[in-house]
Image (cartoon, helix red, strand yellow):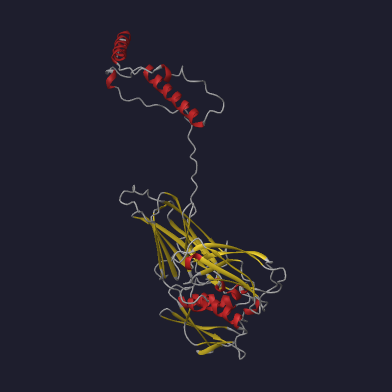
C-alpha cells in the first residue's frame, strides 16, 4: 500500500507540537538544577555514581523512543508502549547463590560420658563425647549396649586408663528396659570390678549412669552382674535404679521460680515503656570450671520483667531437648530467635521463641544440677549459670575463682600453687549482701579472714562479689578457703 510520506510527517509534527504546548511543565529552581550543583570530587560514593549511570540509561531510552517513527498510520496517542532494549544484549550470567548450611534440629545422642578424673575429685559430673558407632542401632536396648561397650572398651579411646575394664573379662551380657529404667547385666570375673577407692568408684558409677541414660526416655540405670545378681563396685553396693541427679553430687535440686520486675512508681503517669530488643550468647567452661552460662542482653528498650524456672523434660517428645529444661521468659523481642544445638556438657541446646511481646529461652540441660540467676547493669543482662564444682557451690554462695586444688590422688598429677595473694570471685545471695571469707590451715587455724558486700543481698536473684586475699608470708603448705555468710 502506498502512503503519502510528506503528508504523514506533517501530521506527526503538528501532533507533537500540540503535545509540547499543552504539557504541564515542572520548573526546576536554580538551586536544585545541575548547573548549581558542585562538581563531583574524587571519592564519590558508589550510590551517587550508580544513580548517575541509571539516569543516563533512562534518558537514552526515552530519546530513542521519541525519535522513532510510528510503524502504522494510527494516531500517536494509541501507539502501544515501546519496548526498551537492554544496553548489553549478551546473555547475563546468573551469580550462584550459596546454599546455607542446614542447622541440626536435634541433639546428638551418639555420645558416651567420660569423666575428667582430676575434675571428678572436685565434684564435676562427666562430660559427653561423640562416637560414630554408638547410639545408632535399631532398638533402644542395642543402642544402650553399644554405648556401654564403648565406655568399657580399651580401644574406644575414651575413659581413664585405670577406670577401663578389659572387655574380654568384663562386658555387657544383656540390656533390659522397663518403663524409664534400663537394667544392664555385666559378665564379671571372680575378682569383680577393678575400681578401688571412693573417688574412682563414684567416677565409674557416674559414667555408667550418664552413658546409659543418654537414651531418650531412660532416666535410671540398675547395674547387675553375672545373671542378675546385685553388683558391688569396691564398697559400693548397687541395689536400686539410679538417676543422673543421684550421682551428680550436687544434692536435691529445688525447682524454684525466680521472678524480677522493674517497679514503676510514677505509673500511670509514666510514659509507655519501649519494647525491649534482646540478644543472647552462651559459654561453657570459659570463666568457671563446670559452669554453663546464658547471657540475655537488653540492647534497647525496657525489659520490664523476667521469670526463670526449671523442670524435668521428656526427651522422647522434643528431639532438641535433654533430661532437664531451664526456661527464661523476658518481656522483649529476641533479634535472632530459633534453635542452637550446643552439645557441650552440661548444655545441649538453646531454643528461643518470641510471642506476644515476650521471649522464652529454653535451655536443654543434661541433668537437674543447680542453677543461679543474676542481673547485671549497663547494659542490663540477665545471667543464668548452670552447675559448677560441687565443693564450691551452696544454696547461697558460689565460688568461681580460684578453682579448687585438691590433695594428691591416684589420678591427680602435680598441681600448681596459687600463691599467697589471689582473687576470689563468684555469686552470692547472703543476708544484707554480706559475704564473709576465711583461710584456714590443715589444723583449722585461721590464717586470714574478712568480708565484702555483694552487688545484691538476700534475694532469689544472686549478686556478684570479688575479694582480694593476702596471706601472711609465714604461710606454707596446703590451705583451705571458705566463703560463707
Q: Is residue 212 positioned above or below 423 on the image?
A: below
Q: Is residue 355 left or right of residue 216?
A: left
- The x, y position of residue 189, in whole percent, is 60, 89
Q: Is residue 85 left or right of residue 11?
A: right
Query: Looking at the image, which is closer to me, 24 or 411?
Result: 411
Query: Looking at the image, which is closer to me, 314 or 196?
Result: 196
Q: Is residue 83 left or right of residue 387?
A: left
Query: Looking at the image, which is closer to me, 246 or 91?
Result: 246
Q: Decide if residue 131 is in sight here.
A: no
Quarter holding residue 60:
top left
Query: Looking at the image, which is closer to me, 472 or 375?
Result: 472
- The x, y position of residue 101, in whole percent, is 50, 53
Q: Is residue 169 left or right of residue 174?
A: right
Q: Is residue 392 positioned above or below 280 on the image?
A: below
- The x, y position of residue 84, in whole percent, is 39, 26
How many tags in the picture? Answer: 0
Image quadrant holding the N terminus, namely top left
- The x, y position of residue 285, in whole percent, is 57, 64
Quarter holding residue 337:
bottom left
Q: Decide if residue 265 is in sight here.
A: yes
Amino acid at each position: 500500500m502506498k502512503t503519502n510520506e510528506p503528508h504523514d510527517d506533517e501530521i506527526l509534527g503538528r501532533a507533537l507540537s500540540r503535545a509540547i504546548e499543552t504539557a504541564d511543565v515542572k520548573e526546576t529552581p536554580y538551586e536544585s538544577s545541575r548547573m548549581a550543583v558542585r562538581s563531583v570530587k574524587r571519592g564519590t560514593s558508589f550510590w551517587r555514581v550508580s544513580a548517575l549511570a541509571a539516569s543516563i540509561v533512562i534518558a537514552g531510552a526515552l530519546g530513542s523512543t521519541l525519535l522513532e517513527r510510528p510503524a502504522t498510520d494510527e494516531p500517536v496517542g494509541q501507539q502501544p508502549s515501546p519496548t526498551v532494549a537492554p544496553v548489553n544484549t549478551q546473555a547475563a550470567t546468573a551469580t550462584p547463590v550459596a546454599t546455607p548450611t542446614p542447622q541440626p534440629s536435634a541433639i546428638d545422642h551418639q555420645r558416651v560420658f567420660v569423666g575428667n578424673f582430676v575434675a571428678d575429685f572436685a565434684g564435676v559430673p562427666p562430660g559427653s563425647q561423640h562416637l560414630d558407632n554408638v547410639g545408632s542401632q535399631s532398638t533402644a536396648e542395642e543402642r544402650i549396649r553399644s554405648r556401654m561397650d564403648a565406655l568399657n572398651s580399651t580401644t574406644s579411646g575414651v575413659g581413664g586408663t585405670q577406670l577401663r575394664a578389659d572387655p574380654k573379662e568384663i562386658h555387657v551380657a544383656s540390656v533390659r528396659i522397663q518403663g524409664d529404667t534400663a537394667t544392664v547385666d555385666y559378665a564379671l570375673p571372680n575378682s569383680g570390678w577393678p575400681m578401688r577407692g571412693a573417688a574412682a568408684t563414684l567416677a565409674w558409677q557416674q559414667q555408667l549412669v550418664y552413658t546409659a541414660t543418654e537414651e531418650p526416655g531412660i532416666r535410671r540405670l540398675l547395674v547387675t552382674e553375672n545373671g542378675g545378681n546385685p553388683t558391688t563396685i569396691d564398697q559400693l553396693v548397687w541395689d536400686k535404679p539410679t538417676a543422673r541427679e543421684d550421682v551428680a553430687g550436687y544434692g536435691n535440686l529445688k525447682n524454684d521460680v525466680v521472678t524480677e520486675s522493674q517497679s514503676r512508681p510514677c505509673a500511670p503517669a509514666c510514659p509507655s515503656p519501649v519494647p525491649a530488643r534482646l540478644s543472647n550468647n552462651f559459654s561453657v567452661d570459659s570463666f568457671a570450671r563446670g559452669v554453663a552460662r546464658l547471657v540475655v542482653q537488653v540492647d534497647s528498650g525496657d525489659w520490664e520483667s523476667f521469670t526463670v524456672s526449671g523442670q524435668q523434660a521428656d526427651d522422647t517428645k522434643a528431639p532438641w531437648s535433654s533430661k532437664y529444661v531451664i526456661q527464661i521468659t523476658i518481656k522483649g523481642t529476641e533479634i535472632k530467635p530459633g534453635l542452637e544445638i550446643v552439645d557441650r556438657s552440661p548444655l545441649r541446646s538453646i531454643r528461643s521463641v518470641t510471642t506476644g511481646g515476650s521471649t522464652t529461652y529454653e535451655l536443654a540441660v543434661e541433668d537437674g544440677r543447680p542453677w543461679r540467676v543474676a542481673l547485671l547493669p549497663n547494659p542490663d543482662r540477665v545471667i543464668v549459670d548452670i552447675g559448677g564444682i560441687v565443693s564450691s557451690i551452696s544454696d547461697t554462695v558460689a565460688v568461681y575463682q580460684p578453682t579448687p586444688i585438691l590433695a594428691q590422688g591416684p589420678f591427680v598429677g602435680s598441681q600448681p600453687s596459687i600463691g599467697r595473694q589471689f582473687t576470689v570471685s563468684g555469686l552470692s545471695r547472703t543476708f544484707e549482701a554480706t559475704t564473709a571469707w576465711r583461710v584456714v590451715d590443715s589444723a583449722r587455724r585461721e590464717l586470714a579472714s574478712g568480708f565484702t558486700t555483694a552487688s545484691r543481698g538476700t534475694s532469689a536473684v544472686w549478686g556478684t562479689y570479688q575479694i582480694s586475699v593476702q596471706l601472711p608470708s609465714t604461710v606454707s603448705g596446703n590451705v583451705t578457703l571458705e566463703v560463707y555468710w
